[in-house]
Amino acid sequence: MSNIEGLDYDLFICHASEDKDEIVRPLAALLGTRGRRVWIDEGEIELGDSLRQKIDNGLARSRFGLVVLSPAFFGKHWPRVELDGLAAREILSGEKVVLPVWHRVGLEDVARYSLPLAGRLAARTEAGVESVVDMIEQVFESSNDQASTIATSPAPAKRREAITATAEPFLVLAPPSQHRLNDPHQVTPPPQVIWAQSALVLVENVGTALALIRSADADAVGVGAVTVKPPTAVAPGATRPIELVVNTMTPDVRLAAGQLVRFWLDYGSGEEADRRLWAVAQYNAGGGWANVGSDNRPLE
């Protein structure tokens, strides 16, 4: 039986048919062994059925939509229709519905298809089907915890904190509207004149433990070296700025509109870092930043 009251399926798998053998069927089979009811087209659509009607019915009766993003997916019509349906449900309900899985694609591939999708934490099939299913199970566990918290907690101010918090430090990017770019300024006297332009990108600790930043780095962006200046710590529920400083020898050089900056932070709750947040931010005309993609996973 489904674990979500009022719905017949736990997961609707949105995918391209080319990915069935390699990833979709193994995923569905393993999820079945974990007690999950999965909607997959070959098990639900019969000869003579209306494809659109069956898909709409499956979407409406499933708690989450597992979206297998792949090169084949990007070129297909029906998977896009299914994804649009899941996204509409998410907007209307205000709850998480879309669970992305990256299969043989990277950040740039997903960003070209959909920037909002690229900004979500995704499971990756390169880690193995079992790892993907483990991440999916974490979502269900979190969803069940949220339901019990909502049912027992009378304090709305504390409810969001209880719902979103994890039992460890966990850093995420803050909304793009809170990011900003500072004007370039001279940082050394003549004759060696170096100008610096700094970007402040906010991160938030949505866990319940103090996040201690142990190291940080960034990729060059084509205009000079990038120095990362993270805070030493981010308290649970707090938002702190990460300063990305771009140095250049030419005063009239600026970060161009559309420029990407990739950075990462290694952190943990003790002396040794055990997690890494990496993110890609894009500078837009007018001085704002947009989250292009991010990920947060244990350090190996």
Image (cartoon, rainbow, N blue to C red):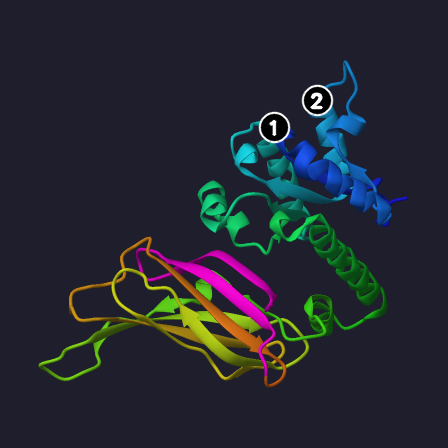
Residue 150 counted in the magenta span: no
Horizontal side of 245 relative to 175 (left or right) equals left
The kind of residue tagged 1 is Trp
Q: Where, by quadrant of the figure, is residue 197 drawn? A: bottom left
Percent across and percent down for residue 218 are: 40, 68
The residue at 73%/24% (across/down) is 53
Which numbered disc covers residue 92?
A: none
* Image coords of residue 215 (percent x, y): 48, 78
Left or right of residue 37, residue 270 in this image: left
**Secondary structure under badge 2?**
helix
Quadrant in the picture for the N terminus = top right
| Above or below, 5 relative to 179 | above
With respect to residue 115, does 15 lie above or below? Answer: above
Q: Is 75 drawn above or below residue 35 in the view shown? A: above
Q: 85 or 20: which is nearer to us?
A: 20
**Which residue occupies the foreground of this view, 140 or 275?**
275
Q: Residue 123, image x and y in percent?
A: 63, 52
The answer, for residue 174, to whether it is visible in the render is: no
Q: Name the residue under label 1.
A: 78
Tell me where residue 182 sits by quadrant.
bottom left
Residue at x 62% of width, y 30% of height: 18
Q: Name the residue under label 2.
A: 51
Q: Where 147 falls versus 246 (above or below)?
A: above
Tag 2: residue type?
Answer: Leu
Q: Where is residue 295 in the image (x, y as percent from the top left)?
A: 55, 60
Residue ranking furthest to the right: 1
Residue 16 is left or right of residue 250, and the answer is: right
Magenta-drawn segment? 272-300
Does the residue at mark 1 contact the one at mark 2 (Cβ under 8 Å)? yes
